[in-house]
Amino acid sequence: MKLFHINQEEMDKRTFFKSAALAGAGLFATRIGTTATPDLPYLRLFSPGPLTNDQGEYVLPPLDYPYNALEPHIDEQTLKLHHDKHHAGYVRGVNKAMKAIQGAREKNDFSLIKHWERELAFHGAGHVMHSIYWKNMTPKKTSPSGTLKKYIKRDFGSQEAFINYFTAATKSVEGSGWGILAYQTGTDKLVVLQAEKHQNQSQWISIPILVCDVWEHAYYLKYQNKRAEYIRNFFDVVNWDDVGSRLDHLLDMA
Ligand SMILES: [Fe+2]
């Protein structure tokens, strides 16, 4: 298996982007030496667009549905605040960190580099995870199909067993964080992970394909302390077509 192997010629041709933080999601990446948007398979994981604009600045992706489209499972007020305020804050934060780090490099002054690297990881991972989360949801009723369905059955026994496991793991994330269904490169398996905050992912070789936000801002207005109920209802709006296409895309890269 040669997952994520890109040869040198390919890198040069496509303007290789360098992993800046490999923060929580294990995928946060920034490009160097160019402002053009490269067509790299990694970026299509966040389809339809990359995380940055042509100036290389991180941008807030629009939602594919209206703020009230996921009612009653995800309420309009929460969704609006979550996207327009919280996610937008991560985008501002990662751009600020990138600018500060660029300034530090230009001045060769790295006295605050620890702070800015932490900011880069925190906000960058938040941007990546939320960009996946919005795409992972839809007002349409979907269900796992194709390879995703096969892999869920193979690795968890059944769809129901997977949801029970994912819900239990996600409910028990300590403090703020995420439940993650990830594809584990190198083993060709699906795994369920917890991530505290965003940047504390435990397996660098695992690529998120389904993420459930369990920071309180994601559910507290409607569900208060009933985190498990929110997770159960999250599954009523999961976009399995999106999850399946992320897995297919990763397998295509093998
Ligand atoms: Fe969030």
Image (cartoon, grey):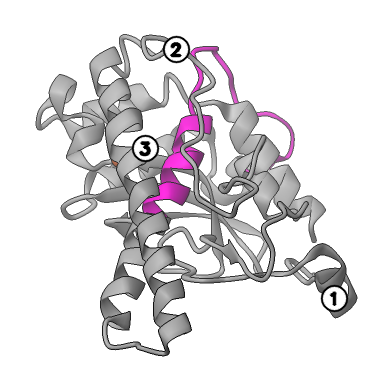
Going from N to C along the chain, the mark reached first, 1 or 3, is 1
Q: Provide the secondary structure element on which disc 3 rests.
A: helix
Q: Quadrant of the N terminus?
A: bottom right
Q: Residue at x 41, y 85 (%)?
A: 107
Q: Is residue 201 visible?
A: no
Query: CA–CA distance between discs 1 and 3?
Result: 40 Å
**Crowding at mark 2 (Cα within 10 Å: few <14, some 14-19, many 20+):** few
User: Viewed as shown, does residue 66 lie left or right of 205?
Assistant: left
Picture residue at 38% right of the left edge, 44% below the top: 165
Residue tagged by mark 1? 7
Q: Locate ligand 1 by image quadrant.
A: top left
How far separated are the C-alphas under marks 2 and 1?
41 Å
Residue that carries the numbered disc 3 in the rendered image: 164
Give whichever of discs 2 and 1 has the lower sequence position.
Answer: 1
Tell me if mark 1 has few (under 14), some (14-19) or many (20+) residues whose alpha carbon lies within 10 angstroms of its own.
few
Question: Is residue 215 visible from the viewing direction of this image?
Answer: yes
